[in-house]
Amino acid sequence: GAVVSQHPSWVICKSGTSVKIECRSLDFQATTMFWYRQFPKQSLMLMATSNEGSKATYEQGVEKDKFLINHASLTLSTLTVTSAHPEDSSFYICSAIPGLAPKSGANVLTFGAGSRLTVL
Amino acid sequence: GDSVTQMEGPVTLSEEACLTINCTYTATGYPSLFWYVQYPGEGLQLLLKATKADDKGSNKGFEATYRKETTSFHLEKGSVQVSDSAVYFCALSGQNSGNTPLVFGKGTRLSVIA
């Protein structure tokens, strides 16, 4: 089946540094990928929609200059947390839709295993 | 906007007990409804889905019925196993959603003990 790989699975960094997280679709092409953030005991919160070859679409309240998204190819999207601070510590998850979405509107997203960021 | 409310956990059950995790939603039109499962250290996996009213989704002994009159999509399993221990997320996507991503509930952690 479709597989989405995220790297790194966990990272610890110092406050003020930048961290890049990669999201790859391993056996399918994804023109659109989604980036979520998950706080402890909370649900996933959609941060942005990553579109191949164009600018990402950010959800309200998400700082585009802090969370840089680059969708350079049909199999790779990256999220860079710039000048990270402890409040950016979270679990970041990406997802993508393999193939064409059915006309019924039922999306079947494939999720990566997530990347846990800890900012000291 | 659209939202999903599911029962808070954690839920702890003995093996072979019955499971129900409640989920209700608020949405305009006719959303599609989903249950995702997240096993420890893994990404979310689609467990089952239903795309229209009265549809029943089922997989691995789990099932949920799309009830439009009560705006609910409760997850049920007649006999849980230790391997079912995970976090379960109820989610919806709007009609005509195309590539629109899902709205998730907060998740319910299930622990099954032998």
Image (tube, helix red, strand yellow):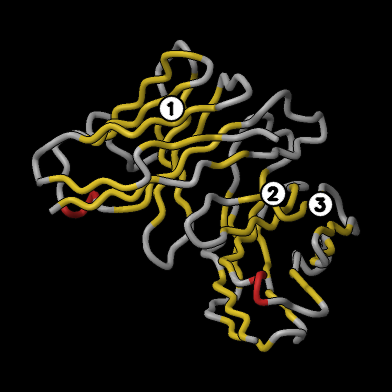
Q: Where is residue B71 in the image (x, y as percent from the top left)?
A: 75, 64
Q: In which quarter of the image is residue B68?
A: bottom right
**Residue at 57 percent of width and 55 percent of height:** B104
Residue toward you, B28 or B31: B31
Report crowding for label 1: few under 14, some 14 to 19, many 20 or more residues within 10 A (C-alpha): some
| Residue located beneath label 2 in the image | B28
The part of the image, by quadrant, that contains residue B102 is top right
Q: Which residue occupies the foreground of this view, B3 or B111?
A: B111
Q: Position of residue A24 (x, y in %)?
A: 48, 28
Q: Which mark is residue A25?
A: none
- The residue singled out by tag 3 in the image is B50
Q: Which chain carries label 2?
A: B
Amino acid type at image mark 1: Thr
The chain carrying label 3 is B
Identify which residue is drawn at 57% across, 32% down: A96
**Between marks 2 and 3 in the image, the one whose residue lies nearer the viewer:** 3
Q: How far apart are marks 2 and 1 (CA)?
A: 23 Å
Q: How many marks?
A: 3
- Mark sitting earlier along the chain (2/3): 2
What is the C-alpha distance between the residues marked 3 and 1? Answer: 28 Å
Left or right: B47 as drawn, with respect to A63: right
The residue that label 1 is drawn on is A57
Query: Which quarter shows the C terminus of chain B?
Result: bottom right
Residue B19 versus residue A76 in the image, above or below: below
Disc 2 residue type (three-letter): Thr
The image shows residue A6 at horizontal and vertical percentages of 44, 37
Q: Residues within 10 Å of mark 3 (few under 14, many from 20)?
A: many
Point out the residue furthest to the right here: B54
